[in-house]
Amino acid sequence: MSEKGPVYLTAEGLQKLNDNLHFLKTKERSRISAAIAEAREKGDLSENAEYDAAKDEQGHLEARIAKLEESISAARIVDESHIDPSKAYVLSNVTVKNTATSAKQTFKLVAAEEASFAEGKISVTSPIGKGLLGKSVGDKVAIQIPSGKVEFEILSIDR
């Protein structure tokens, strides 16, 4: 299990992690091994920048693989039928209104591994995600974000 505890994912999110892990272990490892072999053939390794770069890339790849494996081993599939629909939890679509600007936004609360701001998916470990967790429609929450404090009113929660 992850040192940080369980990683709550959707079945789709877990599949994406498994697909990414498979790609890294098969295609990327092979590509980097070939780059190391090619650089090794160019002679003196102590002065070979291509070799050093390929070895660095290999180290980064192995770290990414280890992190994915840890997340997958700690994964717990979220069963939506056991979640209180009146409160914001993982997999909730939460529509909020910024009380200062009256701007409305909808966020889908997901695990960090599934977060994608472009898709409106925010991590439950992000400042906004943490601030919304467990809240109900009508609640007002003040959340400290990097650019300052923002206050939201929760307008709706959907699954």
Image: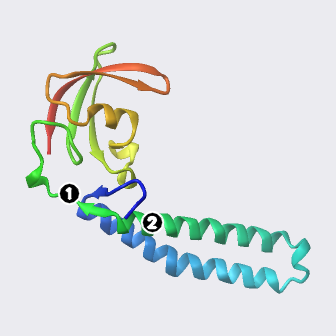
Residue 137: horizontal and vertical position, in percent?
14, 27
From the viewer's perspective, is 16 left or right of 59? left
The front one of 107 and 86 is 86
- Residue under pointer 1: 78
The front one of 116 and 7 is 7
Disc nearer the start of the sequence (2/1): 2
Kind of residue at disc 1:
Val
- Residue under pointer 2: 68
From the viewer's perspective, is 133 left or right of 56? left
C-beta proximity under 8 Å, tags 2 and 1: no
From the viewer's perspective, is 96 left or right of 86? right
Residue 28: horizontal and vertical position, in percent?
56, 75
Residue 40: horizontal and vertical position, in percent?
81, 83
Q: Callout 2: few (<14), some (14-19), or many (20+) C-alpha neighbours within 10 Å?
A: some
Secondary structure found at label 2: helix
Q: In the image, is residue 60 above or below residue 125? A: below
Q: In the image, is residue 149 above or below residue 28? A: above
From the viewer's perspective, is 96 left or right of 128? left
Colour scheme in the image?
Answer: rainbow
Residue 62: horizontal and vertical position, in percent?
58, 71
Location of the N terminus (image quadrant):
bottom left
Kind of residue at disc 2:
Leu
Q: How many marks?
A: 2
Q: In the image, is residue 10 above or below residue 105? A: below
Residue drawn at 62 percent across, 65 percent down: 60
Q: In the image, is residue 75 above or below residue 93? A: below
Secondary structure found at label 1: loop
Q: Quadrant of residue 12?
A: bottom left
Distance of mark 2 from mark 1, alpha carbons? 18 Å
Q: Quadrant of residue 99?
A: top left
Residue drawn at 91 percent across, 80 percent down: 44
Q: Callout 1: few (<14), some (14-19), or many (20+) C-alpha neighbours within 10 Å?
A: some
